[in-house]
Amino acid sequence: MNEIFRASADVLTAKTRTALLDVGATPETAEATTQALLYASNIGVDSHGVRLVTHYAAMLRAGRVKTNPILKVRRTAPATAMLDADNGLGHHASYQAMKLAIEMAGQAGIGAVGVMHSSHCGAVGAYALKAAEAGMVGIVTSNSDANVTLFNGSRTFHGTNPLAMAAPVSNQMPWLLDMATSSIPFNRVRLYRSLGLPLPSDVAADAEGNITQDAMRAAMLLPLGGESYGFKGAGLAGMVTILSTVLTGAVIDPLLVQMTETSDFTTPRNVGHFCIALDPARFIGREAFDGVLKNYLALLRAVPSTVPGESVMAPGDREWKIAEERKRTGIPVDPDTQAFLQL
């Protein structure tokens, strides 16, 4: 087996930014997209990391995504707003939406911003994390095109519809939940295809609805919970759809143009996102929030593990551990992305 190619975060940052600038992206768009992709690559979410730059560059070049979008903000109340992403890359729009949500939460205790006319925004935890870095709780959702079947469904309906939440922890790395409402994201299927690896069991089905571990045959994903409890994931996907599209005016999942539709690289998709920021100081108070959350996490991590030599982890523990490891060893890059970035 060939040794996995690795590169430093600095090298990948420079190469990714340059690749986006080379196809006409504005410096703001290129910087925001690069930051979001490196967030994912650093914490081990390789399906949504730098490998996506190849797709984004193709969409910018073909015209589906604007290289120079003009973002428009409409304030609707002291704590609410809408952001029109002007069919640009979703990363820039999402960072701007969360920035506005944080500003409003600083005044009103809560800020909520809906985003429409956007596109794929990568791993949504990148934007929730911005709230935690500002001392607030952040919640982010995004819809996506239909590639996940319903519980006992015979065809695709929802997207992978990710959701994320981040919370600041005094003198520690933030609590961070960043997940899809499907069994796995479809970009992981594409990554496994590139790497020639089999899929985990109970996460994907072929075009006839049969469970498969063959990444090349996978045509749809199962909702979180798989064959037995997929109604939970399907319900969460619906929640994300309501927040990200019904509230914003974006296109609902089953009507979205497919992200990788090869016959049409020019029609905008109108993906929707939703960003919420909450200021703990306006609820229980900052000092009490910090103390209760630290106590909660201490009690959680003190629970004995059933796996010898392992310990239980809070959301984010695994990600921050991987980030530290990748600072030392570098970030793994799949062969397709390695070739595109000329590494």
Image (cartoon, helix red, strand yellow):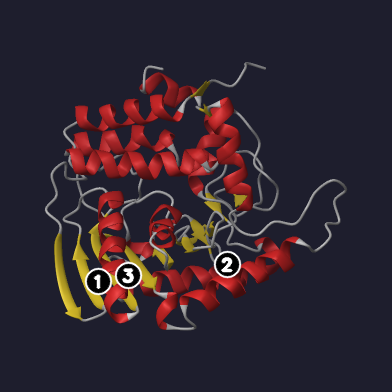
Callouts 3 and 1 close, C-beta under 8 Å: yes
Give x and y (percent) for residue 133: 41, 57
Q: Secondary structure at mark 2?
A: helix
The first of marks 1 and 2 along the sequence is 2
Say whether residue 206 is left or right of residue 113: right
Q: CA distance from mark 3 to mark 2?
A: 18 Å
The residue that appears at 26% across and 79% down in the rendered structure is 79
Which amino acid is tagged 2?
A: Gly
Give x and y (percent) for residue 97: 27, 62
Say whether residue 6 is left or right of residue 91: right
* Residue 249 badge: 1
The residue that appears at 35% across and 79% down in the rendered structure is 109
Q: Nearer the viewer, residue 169 or 64?
A: 169
Q: Would residue 134 be seen by someone viewing this image from the given angle?
A: yes
* Residue 54 badge: none
Q: Which residue is mark 3?
A: 245
* As drawn, 195 above or below 84: above
Which amino acid is tagged 3?
A: Thr
